[in-house]
Image: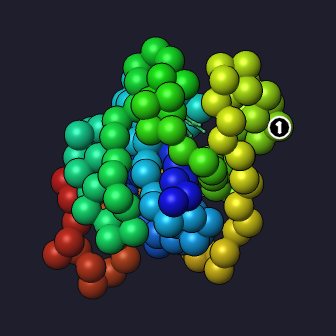
Amino acid sequence: MIRVLATGTFDLLHPGHLMYLEQSKALGDELVVIVARDANVQHKPRPIIPQEQRLLMVSALKMVERAVLGSERDMFQPIEELRPDVITLGYDQHFDALLLQEELATRGIGARVVRLEEHDPCPLCSSRKIVAKVLEDRLSPTPGSEGTRITP
Ligand SMILES: Cc1cc2nc3c(=O)[nH]c(=O)nc-3n(C[C@H](O)[C@H](O)[C@H](O)COP(=O)(O)O)c2cc1C
Ligand SMILES: Nc1ncnc2c1ncn2[C@@H]1O[C@H](COP(=O)(O)OP(=O)(O)OP(=O)(O)O)[C@@H](O)[C@H]1O
């Protein structure tokens, strides 16, 4: 039984997340997921959706066997518990695969790190782009769409 681990923020779920998780699952028999803690998302704007709700949504996806919130302090601790055979990095995830592989080895974790490729590009496969579109569409409505305007 090959257990694959995927990780991410998973804010405002979109098809990019599904592609990443499907590509990950295809590398083994069982997919487990670490969802980033709100406090640890510092490399991009903070998530809109709180960590418990992001975890709930990822847990409900059919390809996901089990999802957990990551550790606040030690990213290797949940990996030691989940014992994956393979760890996947999304095509644009900011970790260096080789460095991560080395750091895992120093902790005695033998999992293989695999960098995935971009699948079908899609214009709204990005949480940031979804937020930008909501702001553009709702705060500066085009004529005729005033009914959906959000008053700031
Ligand atoms: C192997 C691995 C383990 C991780 N473990 C944790 C963790 O325990 N806690 C956490 O908050 N984030 C953890 N992260 C980070 C996030 O899950 C996420 O990958 C990171 O914030 C990059 O997010 P993005 O893909 O949404 O940009 C881990 C990432 C990797 C690659
Ligand atoms: N076309 C795609 N093919 C495969 N994977 C994708 C595609 N689009 C997005 N992904 C993957 O889906 C995941 C997106 O999750 P993540 O939580 O990083 O949010 P995001 O929407 O990319 O956030 P942001 O746009 O704010 O950086 C990433 O791992 C990314 O590599």
Point out residue 53 in the picture as x, y percentages from the top left corner: 23, 46
Would you place residue 124 above or below residue 55 in this image?
A: below
Identified at 71% across, 46% down, the residue is 112
Identified at 20% across, 72% down, the residue is 148
Identified at 73% across, 66% down, the residue is 117
Figure quadrant of residue 120? bottom right
Figure quadrant of residue 27? bottom right
Residue at the extreme front: 1
Point out residue 141 in the picture as x, y percentages from the top left corner: 34, 70
Point out residue 123 in the picture as x, y percentages from the top left corner: 57, 74
Nearest the viewer among 129 and 18 is 18
Q: Secondary structure at mark 1?
A: helix
Residue at the extreme right: 98
Identified at 25% across, 62% down, the residue is 60
- Taking 113 as reference, is 140 left or right? left
Residue at the extreme bottom: 144
Nearest the viewer among 125 and 151 is 125
Residue at the extreme top: 73
Can the viewer see residue 39?
yes
Nearest the viewer among 28 and 129 is 28
- Taking 95 as reference, is 52 left or right? left
Query: CB of residue at label 1: within 8 Å of ligand 1?
Result: no
Q: Residues within 10 Å of mark 1 (few under 14, many from 20)?
A: few
The residue identified by callout 1 is 98
Can the viewer see residue 49?
no
Would you place residue 14 above or below residue 142 in this image?
A: above
Point out residue 3 in the picture as x, y percentages from the top left corner: 51, 54
